[in-house]
Amino acid sequence: MSNFRFLTAGESHGQCLTAIVEGLPAGLRVNIDAINKDLARRQQGYGRGGRMKIETDTADILSGVRFAETMGDPITLRIVNRDWQNWTDRMSVLGEEFGDKVTAVRPGHADLSGVLKYDRDDARDILERASARETAARVAVGALCKEFLQACGIEVVSHVVKIGGIAVDEHNIDRSKIGSGSSELNCYDPVAEEAMKAKIQEAMAAGDTLGGVFEVIVRGAPLGLGSHIQWDKRLDGKLAWALMAIQAIKGVEIGAGFQCGELPGSQIHDEMFLDANHNVYRKTNRAGGLEGGMTNGEEICIKACMKPIPTLMKPLNSVDIGTKQEVAACKERSDVCAVSAASVVGETMTAIVITEAMLDKFGSDAMVDVLSSLTNYKQRVQGGL
Ligand code: EPS
C-alpha cells in the first residue's frame, strides 16, 4: 500500500475547513489556480442554495509546499468559511450555549442516528459535520491529486447525465469534449440541460429537491492499477467506496454496471483484437476500464447516483427529539439540487483513488522516480504482445 492518506476537519458554519494530505511525492509543481478552479466548479450549478452566494471558496496552502513545489512533507490546505462571521455565537468554540437547538430531525439526513449515537440534544452538533460543505476540503485535496495525475499523463473529468429523471441523449454528446466545457449543470447535452433546469425550477416552486446521476471518466490510466490478488487491493472496490462515501450518494456503477445482470456474456464482455504491432485493442468498453480489480488500459467510466437533498422547504413528517412529538422536519437554507456539485466531488474523489493506486505502483518519494518508473512500465506492457 502507498503512504498516501488524507483527513479533513471543519464544520459547515465553523471558521474553516482544513485538510492534511500526506504521501504526495516531492517535486510536484503546484498550481493553486487549478485547485481554486475546481473549488469554484463545485460551487456552481443551477439549484444551489443561498450559501454559494456568500462563499468564494479558495484554498490556502499552509505547509508542505515551497516555491510552488511539494517537498514530500504533509500538505495543509485551508478553506475559510466566509459565513462563519454570521455564526460566531451559534458556533462558538469555547463560549456559552447560544441559539435554538435543532430538534425536528430530517428524514434522509444524519440528524437522528447522529444525535442518538453521539448522545447530543441538538442536531446541529451532527449536521454541521455531516453537511456536504465538507466536500470543499475533499475537492481541494483531489484537485491537488489531479495535478499529480496530469504530470503522469492522466486526466479525470466528469459530467452530469441525469437530474430528476431527465437524462442526456448520449448521441448529443461528444465524449472527447467532456471536461473541456463549463455549463451551469456540468452537462454536455444542452437540450437536456435546459429541461433539467426547468425540472429544478419546478421542484423549487414545490418546496422539493432533486437528485440525479453523474459520470466520472479517467483517461490515460495505465493498465494494471489495483490488483486481483486480495479483496482490499481491487481498484473497482476502492473507487466504489470513495464515491459511495460522498454525502447523498446511493448507488455506484462501473461500466455497464447493473445492465451486466440483464444481458448475456456475449453482449457484455469487450472482445479483444490485435493490431499490426500486436497491441491488444477493443471496440467496446462495457467493463468501464476495470477487469479483475485492475485497470485494463481503457478509459475508466464510473457513474454515481445522488439522492435528493433531505432538507425540504415543504418538510416531511418527522419527530422532535426534544418534545417527543411528531412534527414537520426542520427547514434550513439548503440546495434544491446539487448533482453538478457532486459531479465535481466525484471527479476529485476518483482522482484521489487513482493517485493512491499510482503511488502504490510507481513509488511515492520523488516525482522524478515516479515518472521514470511509469515510463519503463509503460514500455514493457504497452509495447505489444
Ligand atoms: C454546502 C453548504 C451548505 C448547503 C449544502 C452544501 O450551506 P448552508 O447549510 O449554510 O446553506 O448549501 O449542505 C447540504 C446539502 C447539507 O445537507 O448540509 C456546500 O458548501 O456544498
Image (tube, helix red, strand yellow):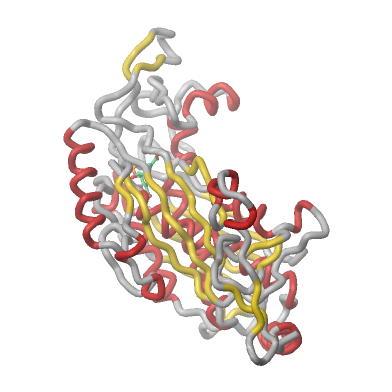
- Among the 4 quarters of the image, the one containing residue 45: bottom left
Q: Residue at x 75, y 58 (%)?
A: 233
Asked whether residue 93 appears in the rendered view, the answer is no
Q: Reply above or below: 80 against 115.
A: below
Asked whether residue 38 appears in the rendered view, the answer is yes
List x then y, in percent, for residue 122.
45, 25
Q: Nearer the viewer, residue 278 or 145?
A: 278
- Which quarter shows the C terminus? bottom right
List x then y, in percent, for residue 236.
65, 56
Q: Is residue 80 left or right of residue 1?
A: left
List x then y, in percent, for residue 186.
33, 61
Q: Reply above or below: 305 against 380.
A: above
Q: Reply above or below: 81 against 23.
A: above
- Which quarter shows the N terminus? bottom right
Q: Nearer the viewer, residue 101 or 27?
A: 27
Q: Reply above or below: 202 against 81.
A: above
List x then y, in percent, for residue 383.
71, 89
